[in-house]
Image (cartoon, rainbow, N blue to C red):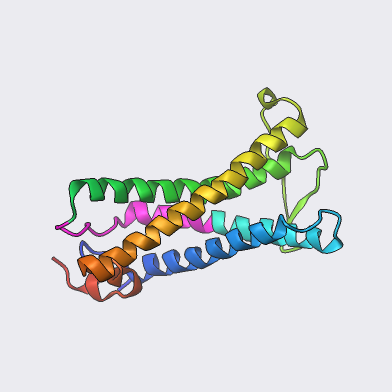
């Protein structure tokens, strides 16, 4: 069962969800650890390069996942959900998608704006060009500071949304006792087409 149905997710959507969930959780933890290190530590440079490399993997997966979602719509929300809950679920998913794209892009812009001009080389193999930084943001230092602010606080907002997302999934599973969580771990609900 590769494709979604009106009652559940297919294997591809499930694989995207859990692969990205693990990568993003790892990147958030890695980012918090990395920023606690002294910038002059020789190991820090390699950690930042690895963080940037995995960030580009997340960005590529986000593009593929969004493409898959556009041609393969999500299952319907449970019928018994209150309209406000449905609205919150839709807004939460929009927020998660927005931040999944915003985090690697703001990181890329931050590196591009840096006066240090340190190159990004994905997994020490593939060089990635810097993005043009709008002059309206002022000096390179000001632009770097602006994108650093967006990247850092975006990470905290993403952590908050993930916590709410997990709490909602657990609420559906243990309190509402519906298939919301089950359909993200199994294609069984997708096979029970309505």
Q: Check residue 65 for magenta coloring.
A: yes
Q: Nearer the viewer, residue 121 or 159?
A: 159
Q: Check residue 73 for magenta coloring.
A: yes
| Residue at the image point whose x is 48% and y is 64% from the top | 21
| Residue at the image point whose x is 19% and y is 60% from the top | 78
Q: Nearer the viewer, residue 99 or 41?
A: 41
**Horizontal arrangement in the rendering, residue 175 relative to residue 117 (left or right):** left
**Horizontal arrangement in the rendering, residue 148 relative to residue 43 (left or right):** left
Q: Nearer the viewer, residue 171 or 6?
A: 171
Image quadrant containing the N terminus: bottom left
Total residue callouts: 0
x then y, percent, for residue 59:
55, 54
| Residue at the image point whose x is 17% and y is 72% from the top | 192
Q: Is residue 189 above or below residue 46?
A: below
Magenta span:
60-80
Image quadrant containing the C terminus: bottom left
| Residue at the image point whose x is 66% and y is 35% from the top | 146
x then y, percent, for residue 14:
38, 68
x then y, percent, for residue 84:
23, 46
The answer to which image quadrant residue 113 occupies is: top right
Q: Is residue 107 above or below residue 20?
A: above
Q: Is residue 134 above or below residue 25?
A: above
Residue 130 appears in the picture as rendered = no
The answer to which image quadrant residue 183 occupies is: bottom left
**Horizontal arrangement in the rendering, residue 52 relative to residue 175 (left or right):** right
Residue 23 appears in the picture as rendered = yes
Q: Is residue 179 above or below residue 102?
A: below
């Amino acid at each position: 069962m590769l494709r979604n149905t009106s009652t559940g997710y297919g294997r591809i959507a499930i694989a995207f969800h859990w692969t990205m969930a693990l990568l993003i959780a790892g990147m958030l933890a890695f980012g918090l650890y990395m920023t606690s290190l002294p910038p002059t530590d020789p190991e820090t440079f390699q950690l930042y390069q690895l963080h940037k490399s995995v960030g580009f993997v997340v960005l590529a997966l986000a593009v593929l996942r969004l493409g898959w979602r556009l041609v393969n719509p999500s299952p319907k929300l449970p019928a018994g959900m209150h309209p406000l809950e449905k609205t919150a679920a839709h807004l939460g998913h929009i927020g998660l998608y927005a931040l999944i794209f915003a985090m690697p892009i703001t990181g890329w812009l931050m590196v591009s704006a840096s006066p240090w001009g340190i190159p990004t080389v994905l997994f020490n193999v593939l060089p990635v060009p810097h993005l043009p930084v709008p002059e309206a943001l002022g000096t390179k230092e000001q632009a770097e500071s602006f994108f650093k602010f967006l990247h850092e606080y975006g990470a905290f907002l993403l952590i908050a949304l993930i916590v709410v997302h997990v709490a909602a999934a657990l609420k559906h599973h243990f309190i509402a006792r519906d298939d919301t969580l089950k359909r993200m771990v199994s294609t069984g609900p997708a096979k029970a087409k309505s």
